[in-house]
Structures are given as structure tokens and as C-alpha cells.
Amino acid sequence: MSRVEREVSRRGFVHSAVIGGVGAGLPALGAVPAQAASSETVPSKRSPVSSAERDFTKQSAALTADRTVDTACQFCNSNCRLKVDLKAGSVIGVRGENADPVQAGGLCVKAEMMPELVYNDQRLTTPLRRVSGKKGDPESRFEPITWDEALETIARKFLELGDAGQAHTIANRTTGRMLRGTGSLVGRLFAMLGSPNNTDVGPVCNDAGANALSATFGLGNFTNGYGVDGATGKEDLGAARYMLLLGTNQAETHPVTYEHLLREREKTGAKLTVVDPRLTPTGAQADRWVAPKPHTDYALVLGMLHHFVTTNRHDQDFVNRWVLGFDELRDHLIRHRYTAAWAAKVTGVPAKTITDIAEEYAAAKPAAIYCNAGISHQLGAFDTYRVLTFLAAVTGNIGVPGGGCNFMHNTWPGDLHLPPLRAAVPDRRQALPVGPDYFAESILTGRPYRLRAIVSQGNPLVSSANTTRVREAFQKLEFFVYTGLFMEEPAYYADIILPVCSGLEMEGVYMRRDDRAIRWQDQVVPRVGESRTDPEIWIGLAHALARLDNRRPAAEWREAFPKQWLDYRALWAQFVQHTPAMAGMTEQRMRRRPEPLRWPCPSTDHPGVSTLYLDHPSWYAAAEALDADNRGKRFLTPSGKVEIFTQELQDKLIPTGHGALPIFYTHPEVTGDHPTVRYTSGFVTSPINPQAVTHPVSIGPRQGRAPHGAYPLMGMTGRPSVVHFAEVTHWTRTGKQLNGVRLIQIHPRAARASGIADGDAVRVESPRGSVTGTALLWDGIREDTIFVPNTFGPAQQVGDLFGAPRYEPANVLPDDGYYDNLSGQQAFKCFACRVVKDTRS
């Protein structure tokens, strides 16, 4: 199929922003609908949009900045530099970094929301203590207290539990919001307390991709970089001749880096295939949009692999030299008859389309794979990602510029090391099953033990699956500390509330670009009220423990958390000093760079690694810095090669019900008769996260009756639009003005069958509960699928200004009982549902 020519205006995705100025533009937020959502659609050509604008803020005495501060955006993993203009101490403009060739001066609409987090009358400004009210009641009353009172209340509770032999019942639930390295501080404090339950945001976000990459290649990171590789002087991801995107809507989730890929594509003529059950602005730029049934990407990729290996389209030279387990993979695919014809029956995508994609991908050198939450938020997330790594491995598209497995939101940069902890630490029990979404199960059932105290930096009352059950758990939780910017939903369940800083109010390393690249950001404006950064909170808690702990000498707490670390520059210097693979990522070096610097970077004269596993001296130097045992290794697995199948890996996975060679299954609420998983009641050690336990599964036919008689559609949740990032943008006026209404995407034929017209108030119902929204008839979605935007919640009072409804969280709908038992990922991308008119007043 020939490439469809189109002219892409940068302002279709990104723009330069001037707060309140004439030059402030907004991105095109929609896409031209395609024909009815079949298995393969080529979007129509769009007319060009002029980007010529006059800026009448120039030479304005009032709007000419007297100071500009370089910082970074906190809203997505494009990690854009913000050049923030100030006049008399107030923010008057936000601009992009022209000297960064990837960013190319661009910003998306969210950049101008950063100041709205500062100048916001809903901000928390002081620590609060619960005074009255049932937990969860919006009428709950809280009173201001000092930071010392708040931290000592928390410390007293933690010590009480520890003295009673219950330290393991204390848990922390982190988020990506925090300054990098906060997790290292939390881990240090939890080690001294004796709790194993210091969780991170990964199982809610995208841990499965990192887990699969680590198992196959040795590191759990996005494999290639945006822009020019400093080691080779050549373009990396922009050099791709083929881009295969599965379950990722980069135009709305990573608009600036996606726009970079489109600019490079105009030079290379690279073909772009987007796999997604609905047409998005990302798919609108594609040569081919493929719409499989939700939760069946696993089958589609198995069908592609089968076609590779049975028609000899794999790279035999690369396989012979660098891959272990190819013969076992080929025999496995043939034995299970994972043909393109089989995959077509599972996915609804014609076999010809599957083989065409396979042949195009195998023939293009290099070819890059991109994935995001659309894959991560599936029941079989780890296994789906594993078979995607096999695609890259057998075609030789790993360790090469322009190729790789670029799975979004992977953990960076792994552990940030501090000086060794000299204090003795107690023995710890095994952690709960991986992922904070197991907290509700622990609290409500006591299996494997009952949590009694939780600190949260995220919003479990919006982000966790089966929200109704999570509410019940947090109502029964003995002690809860909420840290945040606003009185979000979980704040009303809290015993103590702690106010944190927004991104413009702090200095340090905050977000990171997906390709392991980071920036140093400077503080732009004074802090709001008494807000603190997350590192300051945890260091302060350690000093409160020092004052109150009758068993451990105070000096041990103070030595482990010196007050000098309250200065983030001093803390970062400790990370650089004690983490060899980032010895070159000094504050001073990053301050001088207009573009971010990639990890690993073992010395100040090292350019940072763009292409992981590249057969190049710069990679081997970085690999050895990661671990001396890596010396001479290209891939960082035990064998030094790509590991598709080894007996060691097989033996690790078998106790969980999985194997090194994945067997197809999907969610039981996917329509049709497909294998699924059944969980046992016992626990085994997790092979992916061995500090934790997990429930083993067995794969077999669906148990019980299918829910599709009463709930005939398959629902997916996801980001509402480019406007929003998690829940925090719903607390800005711009966010709620532009996208304060939840628009339920439904195919016109499915809508007609339910008597629903465009713009009707509707209710989406699943076996767990229901949520409301407004019907958006959209022929760019499968007829059997609906899309429910997430991140809306009932506490978001900013929308009241615009008459935007307060919504139940979309995660009322999914079943938390079905999750990936290896990565901990919840299955947000498929739930049985129906859509009806909402006749309730």
C-alpha cells in the first residue's frame, strides 16, 4: 500500500505558549473520522493549517519579561523544557526550547497549565488533621496543624505498629509526580522500619513493559532515543524506516516527541502502522490503522511471529549470533497453530492484514515498535510485551539505531543509590502481591495480611480498578496519610493531609523523557503556603522518628537522613556519586544543556546512551558501569544474549502458571470463546519481583457464564484528550474549560441499537457499577467497543465554574479481580458493559 501523502502542521500537536497573549494557540484536539471502524482504514488527507501568527505582545512594556527561568514540564514523558518568563515575580509566559532539536521549540497545550497549578485557589497550603466526619465523607472536617505535629503523628503511628511487630502492615503508594530519587529515600526509611511494602507507580502505569524487556534483553528500559545519538553522531529513532505503534496514542500522550518522529518521517518516508481499537489523532497520521478487538494484541503479534518463522523472514545471521531459544519459539508457534488465520479469528483483523504488517516490518531496516498503556493495561500485559520483544529480536531490530522496543513509561533510571545504610535493619516479611491495587484486597480480607497504615502520593480513589471496592477498603483502613496539591478524592479518607509543591515551585530532576533522558529544572516561583517537596517530607519524617523512637538511637535516623539532603542539589550529588552508571549526570552538566541527557552515562565525557545494546564502545562502557559482571556483554541477560527461551527462565516462570514461551489467553470479558486465567488461593514468590508474593494462575476455558448477554459491549478506559494528564490537570481552569465533559465514544450503529443520539446523556454500566457521560458518536471505533475517558472524579470542583458535571471515576467499571499476576498491571482495557440513556435527574 502506498503512503498517503499529507501535510502536517506542527500546530496540530504542539505550539508555543504565551500566557494570556495573542500568540497562544491551541492544538487541534480531534481527528477526521475514518470510514466505519473496520480492520484496516487509511485516514483521508487533511488540509494544511497555517502556522503564521502575529504576536502583539512583542515590545509591550508590561509583557516584556524581566527574567526567564529554565524548568521542565511535569505533565508527560516528553519532558519538554519550559522557558518561563516572569514580570515583577509573576509568570507571564511559557515558551519551548528552540535549541533542543527534538523539542524544536514546541509545547503542547498542557504547558500553560503549569502556572495554573501555582495560581490556584484550591491549593492545599498547610498540613491538616482530621477533626470529624466519617472517612470518605466530603463533609469531613480538618484543622490546620504544624509540620512537626503532622510528621510526629505519622511517626508515632509507625513506631506503634513496629513495636507491636506489625511494621509489615505499613505501606507507601508512590506516583510519578515526585522528584527523582524520592523512592530511594522511602526505601531507606522502610528498611529501617522493617516494612517490605514500599510500592511504586509502575503496576498502575507501565511496569509490564519494563519487566518483559528485562527478561529478554537484560534492562527494563525504552531501548532507543529521540534525536541524534551523541556517540555515533547519527539520528536514532528518527532513522526508522517502519514504525509499528500498538496501544499508544502518542499524539495525545507524548505530542512533542511524536511530532519529532513525524518530522523525521517526512525525510525518510517511513511507513507508519497504528494498532488501536479506536481511531485517534495518532492513527490519523498513519498509513494503516488496524482496529483489533480489545485485549487481543497478544494474538495479533503471535500471528505475525508465526508468519516470520514459517516463511523465513527472520534475520538468521542475527539469530545465530545473538538469540537463545529461536528453535524452541518456532516449534512452539507451529505446535500451537498460532497462524495469521487463527489470529484473525481472535482479533477480527483479516489474516492478509496481519501478514502484510509482518512482511513490512520484517523487510524494513530498521523498524521500531512503540507501545504504551494500551498494552500495559491488559490481563496478559507481561506476556504480550514478551512476544513483542521477540518480534524485534528475530528480525535483528534490537541494538540498532531506528529500531528497538520503545515501551513507554518504563522506570528510569532504576535504583538511585545513596551511601550504604550503616544502621542495622530488621528482617522483613515478603511484600504483598506486586502493585498498590492489591491494597484493597489486603485491607478487606486480611490476605496474606491486613494493611493498617498507608501513605499515598497518588490518587487510588480514581486510578485503582473497581473503585467502589477501593473506597470500602479506605473507609476501613486504620491510618491514612494523603500528600497532594488539592483536596482530591482520597484526601477525604485521610487522617493526616500534607501539602506538596507543584513543578514550578521546586528545583531538581523531576520527570524524564521516555528514552531515559532527564533535565535539571530550576525553581521558578516561591512555594505556595507551607508546601514541601516529597524528599523534604520523607527526610522530615525520619527526623520525627529520631525524636520519638525509644528503640533505635536518634543518631542512626539522623545519620541515615542528614539534613543537608533537604537541599536537592546535595541529594542529587549523592546519587551521582554512588550510582556508577550515572556518574556523568551532574547538576552542572545538565544545567548547561538545552536538551536532556540520557542514562546510562558513566562519566562526564560520555555522551549518554541512545541505543541500548548497540555494538559500540560507548555502550560497553555504560554496561560495565551498570555492573562489573557486564564487562564485554552486549545484552545484559545471564547469557549475554537475547533470551527468548532458556531453562532457567522457564523454571522461574512455571510456578506462577506462565512459561518462557507464552501461551495465548485474554480477559474473560472479551467477547468470544477464548482461553483465560484462573487464580489459585495460595501464594508463590514472584519471579519478576522476588521480594513479593503473587497468586499462581492456570490457563483454560472461561469459568461460568459469559457476561455478554446483559453486557454486550467491551469498554476501554484511557486519557480524555491531549488536554489532560492524570487527575491533576482537572484542577486547572484550562483543563476543565477545554475538556470538562466526559465524552463516551460509541459507534453510530451501536448507539442506534440502544436508542442513543449524539450528545445524549448516557450511563455506562458494568457488573461492578456505572458511570455517566455524554455520548460522542464516532465511527472511528469498533462497533463492539466503547471508550470511557478516565481521570475524572467527584472531587474536581474547578469544573463547577463551567457547569461541568462531577463524575464517578471510570475505574468503577473494571474488575480488580483480573490482573497480570507477574507485573501487577490492572486490566483497564477491557470490561463487559452496556450503554443506556441516562434518564435520572
Image (cartoon, rainbow, N blue to C red):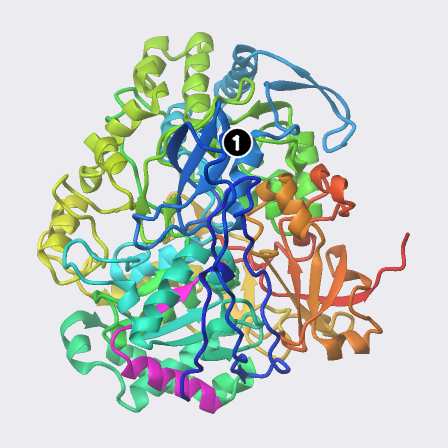
Residue 357 belongs to magenta span: yes
How many numbered markers are drawn?
A: 1
Residue 653 lies, in percent from the top left, at 37, 61
Q: 469 above or below 613?
A: above
Name the residue located 25 percent from the left edge and 72 percent from the top edge: 397
| Quarter of the view holding residue 295 | bottom right
Question: Residue drawn at (72%, 37%), measured in percent from left and top?
Answer: 797
Is residue 822 visible in this depiction of the protein? no
Using the image as rendered, state which of residue 816 and residue 69 is in the foreground: 69
Q: Position of residue 509 (x, y in %)?
A: 35, 35
Asked which secondary structure carries label 1, the reply is helix
Whether the magenta-drawn stretch holds residue 366 is answered as yes
- Left-right relation of 7 to 226: right
Say if 387 sits above or below 696 in the image.
Answer: below
Left/right placement of residue 617 relative to residue 562 reads: left
User: Is residue 812 among what the camera can see?
Assistant: yes
Query: Viewed as shown, does residue 295 lie left or right of 596?
Result: right
Seen in the picture, residue 558 relative to 99 is either above or below; the reply is above
Q: Picture coordinates of residue 127 (x, y %)?
A: 59, 19
Q: Residues within 10 Å of mark 1 (few under 14, many from 20)?
A: many
In this rendering, the answer to whether 474 lies above or below 105 is above
Query: What segment is highlighted magenta in the picture?
Result: 351-372
The quarter in which the N terminus is drawn is bottom left
Q: In terms of image quadrants, where is residue 179?
A: top left
For the point 50% across and 35% down, which residue is it? Answer: 60
Q: Where's residue 436, x and y in %?
A: 53, 43
**In which quarter of the view is residue 772 placed?**
bottom right
Under mark 1, the amino acid is Thr
Of residues 82 and 585, the one nearer the viewer is 82
According to the picture, the residue beneath numbered tag 1 turns out to be 169
Is 576 placed left or right of 33 in the picture? left
